[in-house]
Amino acid sequence: MKRKGMIGILTAEAAVCVIFSLVQVNASGVCSGLAAFPFEQTGYALRALSLSGSVGNAAAILLYMGLSLLPCLAWLILKKKGKLLGIDHVLYGLSILLLIVHYYMINPGLFPAPVPGTGKWMLGCMFYSALSGYVVIRVLLVCRRAQPETLHSVLQKLLVFLNMVFVYLIFGQGLGSLLKAVQNVGSMDSGPVLSGFAQGAQSPGMTYLFLGLGYLVNLLPYVFDMGIVFLAGRMLTALKTDRYGDASVELTSRLAGFCTRALGITAAADVGFNLLQVLFCSSLSQMDLVIHVPVISIIFVLAALLFARYLQEDQKLKREHDLII
């Protein structure tokens, strides 16, 4: 995928996540969480359509069946194209699961959730968990016997997906948590919360400022991860064109340097934010002094750094070999 196309997709996703997070704060009954999207909204619309009359009820039933059988349609398309694998029979199970999820989204009061208000979230997580498992296994089966060109294409698509995950973590999960924290501070009757305990009244303005700073510090690893993914995509394109060319060597060196700086800046930002919280603790009504170690981001950055180092060594050996010849 071209860079402009990827940026366009990520921008659209970020806009959707921001809008959803803002709506969720004011309309939790319709937007209980991103895990339930879009099933919750679909269930709400189908329920309203069903209650509108006999014609609306018939239309709701048809839409209910049609939406739930979309995985079966995907199975038919794969079969027609001759790309059907054994794992694709799971699509029938996903259709059955969608029938169940949509039914309880239309009738949320019938789902026996152990904790009130978590039913829609549980149903969404259940379906996305099954869908992600199917996708992962299918990708592995495709890659196991694929040609290098196919592997390159799959890897490029996975990089796009990774960036979509990072955008969700920044503008979906992260922003949603920030808005909830701001809302909680605004509704507090008494003062600071340190590790979850209330203690005396302080400045809400300073607390809002530090909540915003905390959000920026928490999203910093994901921003660097996105930069690494963009550089990795460019590097893969250069490697496909000429594995040992100057462009490949330059991009590999840039990726290695960027990974190193990303780790250093992430660690420094975390330490600096904790220090600022201690210095201004008397003015804060909420603090977050938990030691934040972005393990997943660090592993991802180190893996990219290690891959870049291996490529650099490989390119160096090739150049030495050419000089000997």
Image (tube, rainbow, N blue to C red):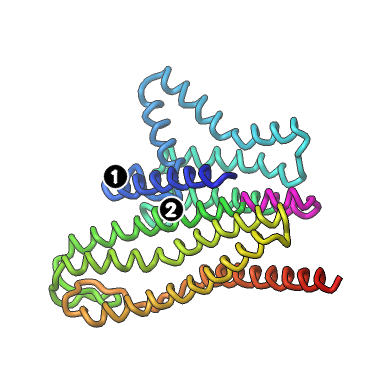
User: Is 155 contained in the magenta span?
Assistant: yes
Of residues 139 and 180, the one nearer the viewer is: 139
In the figure, 104 relative to 51: above or below?
A: below
Q: Is residue 205 left or right of residue 43?
A: left
Residue 180 at x, y percent in the picture:
29, 58
Residue 289 at x, y percent in the picture:
32, 78
Which residues, given as a range, are shown in magenta?
138-157
Give the overall secondary structure of the magenta segment.
helix
Identify the mark nearer the N-term, 1 or 2: 1
Residue 277: quarter of image? bottom left
Residue 7 at x, y percent in the picture:
48, 47
Residue under circle 1?
27
Residue 309 at x, y percent in the picture:
65, 72
User: Is 161 contained in the magenta span?
Assistant: no
Q: Which residue is pictured at 43% across the width and 77% down the height?
A: 267
In the figure, 295 relative to 168: above or below?
A: below
Query: Mark 2 is on which residue type?
Result: Ala
In the figure, 163 relative to 58: above or below?
A: below
